[in-house]
Amino acid sequence: MGNTKKNDRRDFLSKFGTAFIAGAALSPLISNASELLETENNVTEIKNFKGSFEDLLGGDYTNIKLRMQDDVRRALKKPMKDRKWAMAIDLRKCVGCNACTVACIAENALPPGVVYRPVIKEEIGTYPNVSKINLPKPCMQCDEPPCVDVCPVEATWKREDGIVVIDYEACIGCRYCMTACPYEHRMFDFGEKYSDGLPLVANYDKRPSFEYGKEWDREDRHSSPIGNVRKCTFCAHRLDEGLLPQCLTTCIGGANYFGDLNDEDSVIAKLVSRLNVFRLKEEMGTEPNVYYIR
């Protein structure tokens, strides 16, 4: 009886939320890159490091991913409250290949319309004087996340290590958090499948997700995460096992960096403290933990 009530409530809120949020920013791709990058005041103090990456990191740059994995595993030896996960994305190296987007979809068995790692692409200028922006946009894992404050059932919160998470079994699908997120990152799982309309459900649509260290099946339209809001978690299920986020491991341009900001010897801490970095929409006071290098 309890499950029936929960499902009925989720169905109602799903329909109500669709009408309530009509016209709001529901798509993770709705903003273009120039809108997100338009405020020059977002740029932090410019550092003037003149050396090579080898000089900056104090080691062989060609093994950077192995170094970052060592950073992750070293961080896991500390209590969670002493870790602070962060990501840096070098916009000079991103080629817009979407390898990170595809890898994330495969890792998390994401359905149509749910994209944790979009890459916003925009051409700037007038031909022949044009340039292109490729802007990967994961969840910013804010220190002051507005999405948490608006949740009426406390289904979303911030872990001690800085990752904002969602309890699928507590989420009622109201989508208030989607309107509160200034980065338009949160997405709703409507239960759609890539093989909808075909005679048979494809095997890839039956794959479970292993987010939050639990197996989530999609056989029943009332089963979580269907009917829930979903988001990037820096692949917390991988991090907790000492592995890097999947998007980072598949980046062919080497544009992504990750680690524990509280570890001054980590790759991420050295990059953020010494290179030219900025964060999106800093003026909103969200204190995001995704940095961009330019």
Image (tube, rainbow, N blue to C red):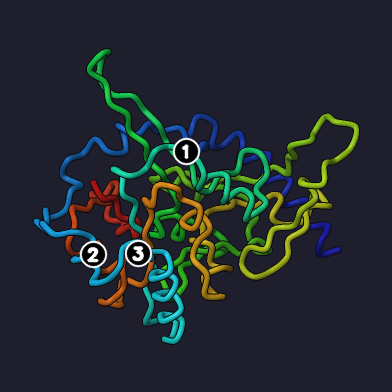
Q: Position of residue 119 (x, y in %)?
A: 44, 39
Q: Which of marks 1 and 3 is in front?
A: 1
Q: Residue 42 carries which label?
A: none
In the rendered structure, which amino acid carries the disc numbered 1?
Cys
**Mark earlier in primary sequence (2, 3):** 2
Residue lying at the far right in this picture: please name it. Answer: 199
Q: In this view, does 29 lie to the left or right of 173?
A: left
The residue that disc 2 covers is 54
Q: Nearer the viewer, residue 91 or 174?
A: 91
User: First in sequence: mark 1 or mark 2?
Assistant: 2
Q: Which residue occupies the foreground of this view, 11 or 214?
A: 214
- Above or below: residue 284 compared with residue 128: below
Q: How far apart are the two marked residues, 1 and 2, measured between alpha carbons?
A: 26 Å
Which residue matches tag 3? 143
Label 1 crowd bin: few (<14), some (14–19), many (20+), radius 10 Å: few
Q: Position of residue 12 (x, y in %)?
A: 71, 45
Disc 3 crowd, CA 10 A, few/some/many (<14, 14-19, 20+): some
The residue that label 1 is drawn on is 97
Please tell me whether mark 1 sits on a helix, a strand or a loop.
loop
State the residue at coordinates (64%, 50%): 106
